[in-house]
Image: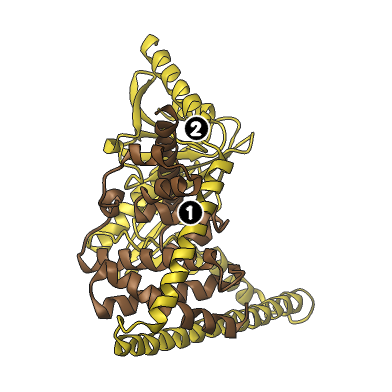
Chain colours: A yellow, B brown
Amino acid sequence: MKDELKNLRETEEFITEFKTHQSEQFFKSLAAEYVSEKGEEYLRECEELETSSEIDDFAILRMDAKFKVSLMRENRETKRSKRFVAWGAVAASFVAVCFVAAYWFTEHGFNLGDSSRELMTQNAARPSVAGAVDIIEEADDMYWGMSDAGLWAEADTDSRIMPAPAAAAGAPVGNELEITADEEPAPTEPLAQAEEFLSRFSALASLTAPEGWQILSLSSDVNSHNAILHLESASGSIVNVLAGEPVYDPDHGEFREILIDQTPAYILVENTHSILFFNLHDFQMVLSTEHDYNELIELAKFWM
Amino acid sequence: MNKNTFEYLYEKYKKLLWRKAYDILKDYALAEDAVSEAFIRIYKHFHRLEDADSSKTAAFLVTVVKNVSINLYHKRNRIIPTDFEEFEQASDFNLEEIIAEKDETARAVRLVDRLSEELRAVFLLKYANDLPHKEIGDILGITENNVTVRLHRAKKKLADMAKEVRQA
């Protein structure tokens, strides 16, 4: 307990010390001065290059061609996605109209007869992974989703289903995709990746939130195959709990080890937000908040 | 800015950006790809640029092309960038020189110059261009989370250096 308090006090001192040296205004003025000075230098360089023969004209011509092709492709894709959205809206409206019409006719218009009605009820009640699935991610010929039957993944024409975890079953599943261009995942079997993702997702989804915290959503990172649980505290702190590859490296040197209930945890104190890193259910977890650092400690204690 | 202005932007800066990309990649074809890719990213956000001839715009464009080039460099060498220090400036941090600097602007430039290109890009896009984290991530091709991490590291490093200068 003594060690724990000592470590926490040291961490607090570190925060206070650090905060005295951080000032948004200071950084803004640094950036403005840098941009003004360097920008002038670039503008001068730009003028010099206009008249110099240092750069091969042929290279510039090739670059022009490449850029024009890329720009055309970009514009075409933008138009296509806009068209797709427009057609999607039309299709959705059509389906909605059909649904309303069908409902109205079954209630007021046609008499479908008992056998037809019974068949419709059976179909509606039958759990169908393919039909009810809410696709979370689609990448590398692999689909991950959530259905009434549970978490679901399919790769190489094979599929895996895990029972839906009870605790977070009510949490909405986010569909945000984060593409990390400079962090290419190591090539592994798609199905193994799917299973790994499912177990991470399942571990996160089984977490219950302590009093005063609300689970906002579950989402995932398409490249790292990490699962992320988003929570919000009563005071408005947003915390992201990540299962999978840690974003932060504990050996980086910016971490401080502390003990929470005799369990080692690593704390990284940042200037505008705090990050808590610890081992939970064999997964590396990262929590971050831009608000109250003490809330993170409480959250960590609840789970550890 | 309208389409014509974007074309003007491209014509004005393409040689400069090509040279900056070539300085990093040392490869004609890759430098062309880098500039092309950089301009596509800028195209999506060019409504943010106010004046095509300003020093701020020039600095913004160079920042983007340098980062695209570094990403291409990593891909070419099949290196997953886990160490942000890889593109650290070659010269050592010379505290005496920065302290001796009488001009505040020169001192600020030297401090920011000490950041690696990857950290500097995030720092400048945030504080010089006022871009939200999501847009910074889009432009640099990294996640929002990564933007937060790099920004923290940049600020911490600058704060540490500023502290050293003050104490000296």
What's the residue type where badge 1 is placed?
Tyr
Q: In this picture, is A261 found above or below A285?
A: above
Asked if residue A205 is positioned above or below residue A88 in the image, the reply reads above
Which label belongs to residue A188?
none
At mark 2, the secondary structure is: loop
Q: What residue lies at 34% left-to-right and 51% top-to-bottom?
A: B116
User: What percent of the width, then of the height, locates residue B100?
Assistant: 39, 38
* Residue toward you, A289 or A113: A289
Q: Quick one: label 2 or label 1, which is nearer the N terminus?
A: 2
Q: Secondary structure at mark 1?
A: helix
Determine the CA span between mark 2 and mark 1.
Answer: 19 Å
- The reply to whether residue A134 is in sight is no
Residue under label 1, please give it: A34
The amino acid beneath tag 2 is His
Residue at numbered disc 2: A21
- Closer to the camera, B51 or A202? B51
* Crowd tier of the residue under label 2, counting other residues whose Cα lies within 10 Å: few below 14, some 14–19, many 20 or above: some
Marks 2/1 in contact by CB < 8 Å: the verdict is no
**What residue is rendered at 55% in x and 85% in y?**
A79
Q: Is residue B91 at least partly visible in the picture?
A: yes
Q: Quadrant of residue A179?
A: bottom left
